Amino acid sequence: MADVIRQQQLGGVRREFAPWTDPAAAPLIRFDAVTKRFGDVAAVDGVSLDIYEREFFALLGPSGCGKTTLMRLLAGFETPDAGRVLLGGEDISAVPPHLRPVNMMFQSYALFPHMSVAANIAFGPKMDGWPRARVDARVGQMLKLVQLDGLGARKPHQLSGGQRQRVALARSLAKSPKVLLLDEPMAALDKKLREETQFELMHIQYELGMTFVIVTHDQEEAMTVADRIGVMDKGRLVQVGTPAEIYEQPNSRYVADFIGDVTLFKGTLEGRDGDVALVRERTSGVLLRALAGMADAAPGATVWIAVRPEKARISPDPLPPDTPNVLSGEVFDIAYLGDLSIYKVRRPDGTFMKASQPNATRLVERPIGWDDKVWLSFAPEAGVLLTR
Amino acid sequence: MATQRNTRLGRLALIGVPALWLTLFVAVPFAIVVRISLSESVIAMPPYEPVFDLSAGFAAFAEALGRLDFDKFVFLTTDPLYLESYLSSIRIAGLSTAIILAVGYPIAYAMARAPKGTQPLLVMLVVLPFWTSFLIRVYAWMGILARDGFLNQALGGLGLISEPLDILSTDTAVMIGIVYSYLPFMVLPLYASLEKMDLSLLEAAADLGCPPWQAFWRITVPLSLPGVVAGCLLVFIPAVGEFVIPDLLGGSDTLMIGKTLWSEFFSNRDWPVASAVAVVLLVALLVPIGIYQHMQARQLEADR
């Protein structure tokens, strides 16, 4: 949760930057109905996506969802079976990887083991035929950028995992590519180092003004670093949006469930009361109210209401009668996370609902304990109506 | 206490068995060869003197020891035959090794890049010739390379040549035999080093602007260097001392140190000179082995 809050603060700083909302803006990268099959399986299935210059874009999804294949299509290691990949308006689908102005940081880092750190970083510029002096200057600059001054003569095997990761980053940045691709760049780092590196990456991206595309299965990481996130499932892009959009307005149960914690209420749409949809929950028969938003479902349709734990209210006392969406149950589990506690409540119909509460004061007047009878509620604006 | 003694015994056996083996079958025979090389040849049995006889007493033993000298090694430098044999051997073995490397590298590369499932089969196919006797396979080459042999018949039949080629009994035939016989010893270490290579390194090279052919020279070749060195030594060292192949496929003018050694030993019955030739050959081959070991030690360090 802490990362979400940080992201929102950062989002405030960068509020100006939203080229995807500008219909006149030309995308730097465009996937145009791209499909890539391996045997019978479509790893990427008709994906269309625009990524803009200076954007930090995250491809998010579980392993096997096609996010890495999509990135490899951009790097040139795979060629699409259908559709086109455009870079700066040019179709690069058939351009071999060594001729693309795109560089990639590999998950395994793929550092050349027989070359020194400096030689690894110099490899790309040398290949482009830079003069010697310029290459040397660039290597020094890159080593400084990733805080590895003085380690240029080392071989990769003489470095720690975190240092190797920095070398890989420096090497992929050395040619100042138009686009930097990062394939699970922090998968091998421990949590603390990963968080530090995430902020460093954002800083570097902002400083260099490059376009970054990151592939990750870690939703916190995606929310921390990215301007926009593309959530993938089984080769398809399920939703593309800013971290806040993805989190606050997921367009499907898949996205709501993949990003963060959520309670889903399954029910039948009974009708509308202005902007508010009325949903009869299947298991309990309770009438729930949630903002209808963009969801276009006819009465009688099966719908779901998604509620984030932090948007649900939990109380040890009965709630006032005019409170909307009141549910009750017994505390089944409590996860104490320090800054907040998450309560898993078992309802009389056997379903569970999650609610979290910040531990604002150290002495809670009346702490909620295991097996306590509690009342839960959420505002209609807190629930997201989902049709799939 | 008992278990501690057992582990110590175990350790002793672990080091002791190979040490004993090496002593009995390497160090002692080599010592005997060195000792013969320091002797004088005589027409007797054994065909050299002095003969050490401990029963004759210590004084006689010491006197015999004093009669050992380096005359035969000096003799090797006076007759150009020996130097020419060494040089010719090194030339033939070196050329053959170069050809084997050129032929073996693409084979090993193709094997290492073949689908994982078929690789064991390919390795087996490379080793398959070993199921037939080495001698028989070299004899088979005599049938192929002879004037009226298979090769000449095939080429003549195709109208490619009007006169049969004289390949058998030349240095060329010897090299063909060596290339054929030693190819697996090059392919296997090369395959081992190419197979363990991380292919994402080639992707990284391509990503950084390196075309495939350059990536081969800049990434694949340097990383397979340990395999190249191992393969070359495995081929070059035995090829230098090769006797059977030059004897069967070479001509009377084919000079190789193995043949020279054989004729000193069996035709001239000059055991001391034959032993001296063997000792010089061994010492000369220790140099590339030393280089190899040095490189291996460096590789081990790099892997850590």
Image (tube, rainbow, N blue to C red):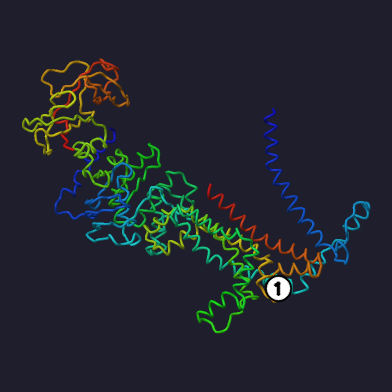
Q: Amino acid at mark 1?
A: Glu
The structure residue drawn at horizontal position 9% and vertical position 30%, both measured from the top left corner, is A270
Q: Nearer the viewer, residue A62 or B118?
A: B118
Q: For the C terminus of chain A, which image quadrant?
A: top left
Residue A58 visible to the viewer: no
In the rendered image, which residue does mark 1 sit on?
A: B84
Question: How far from the left and from the top, in percent, is residue A206?
Answer: 28, 48
For disc 1, the chain is B
Within 10 Å of disc 1 (Cα), the crowding (few <14, some 14-19, many 20+) is: some
Total numbered labels placed on residues in the image: 1
Image side of residue A211 versus residue B265, left or right: left
Residue B268 visible to the viewer: yes
Question: How far from the left and from the top, in percent, is residue A384?
Answer: 17, 33
Location of residue A76 by image quarter: bottom left
Q: Nearer the viewer, residue B269 or B2?
A: B269
Question: How far from the left and from the top, in percent, is residue B68?
Answer: 85, 61
Q: For the N terminus of chain A, which image quadrant?
A: top left
Image side of residue A190 versus residue B121, left or right: left
